[in-house]
Image (tube, helix red, strand yellow):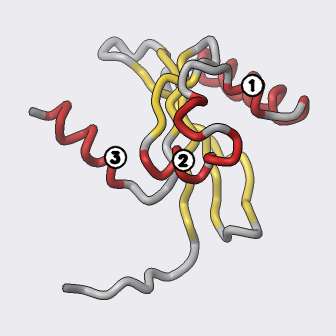
């Protein structure tokens, strides 16, 4: 049951969620990510190497963060940059198994804009 609930949380998130394994292979994209990255292939990016989607500077940064995650089980989230255009902060987050071993990572987007949606 919990797995279905967790999947629903990710599927309904309006921010892009792209999960990668330690080989930087994209293993999952939520609907928001598929839409957001459509011009680069959208859901066809699943199975591709994330590093191939980035410039040399970004690839190096990703590899440095993953190495930092591997140094300690306490290293689990790090701010990477602020996207001025979309007014959001971007973080990389470690994905760990039940033994706290690093199994992958994802990028977390936190938007700073105030919510404008209405209640029902």
Q: Nearer the viewer, residue 104 or 45?
A: 45
Question: Which residue is under mark 3?
Answer: 11
- Rendered image quadrant of residue 119: bottom left
- In this rendering, position of residue 44 left or right of residue 27: right
The residue mark sitting in front, 3 or 2, is 3
Q: CA distance from mark 3 to mark 2?
A: 14 Å
Question: Which residue is under mark 1?
Answer: 51
- In this rendering, position of residue 5 left or right of residue 55: left
Q: Upstream in the sequence, badge 3 or badge 2?
A: 3
Contact (Cβ within 8 Å) of mark 3 with mark 2: no
Q: Dot 1: within a 10 Å radius of its alpha carbon, few (fewer than 14), some, or many (20 or more) residues? A: some
Secondary element under disc 3, as helix, strand or loop, is: helix
The residue mark sitting in front, 1 or 2, is 1
Q: Position of residue 33 (x, y in %)?
A: 53, 46
- In this rendering, position of residue 117 left or right of residue 58: left
Secondary element under disc 2, as helix, strand or loop, is: strand
Q: Is residue 13 above or below residue 58?
A: below
Q: Upstream in the sequence, badge 3 or badge 1?
A: 3
Question: Which residue is under mark 2?
Answer: 108
Q: Position of residue 32 (x, y in %)?
A: 48, 52
Q: Dot 2: within a 10 Å radius of its alpha carbon, few (fewer than 14), some, or many (20 or more) residues? A: many
- Rendered image quadrant of residue 65: top right
Q: Residue at x 44, y 12 (%)?
A: 101
Secondary element under disc 1, as helix, strand or loop, is: helix
Q: CA distance from mark 3 to mark 1?
A: 24 Å
- In this rendering, position of residue 97 left or right of residue 85: left
Q: Residue at x 56, y 78 (%)?
A: 113
Q: Does any portion of residue 77 appear in the rendered image?
A: no
Q: Residue at x 52, y 35 (%)?
A: 43
Q: Is residue 97 above or below residue 88?
A: above
Residue that sits furthest to the left in the current view: 1
């Amino acid at each position: 049951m919990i797995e279905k609930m967790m999947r629903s949380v990710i599927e309904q998130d309006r921010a892009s969620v792209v999960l990668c394994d330690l080989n930087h292979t994209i293993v999952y994209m939520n609907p928001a990510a598929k839409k957001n990255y459509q011009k680069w292939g959208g859901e066809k990016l699943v199975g591709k190497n994330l590093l191939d989607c980035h410039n040399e500077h970004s690839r190096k940064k990703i590899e440095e963060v993953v190495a930092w995650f591997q140094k300690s089980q306490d290293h689990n989230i790090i701010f990477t940059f602020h996207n001025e255009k979309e007014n959001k902060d971007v973080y990389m987050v470690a994905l760990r198994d039940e033994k706290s071993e690093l199994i992958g990572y994802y990028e977390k987007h936190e938007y700073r804009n105030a919510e404008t949606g209405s209640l029902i």
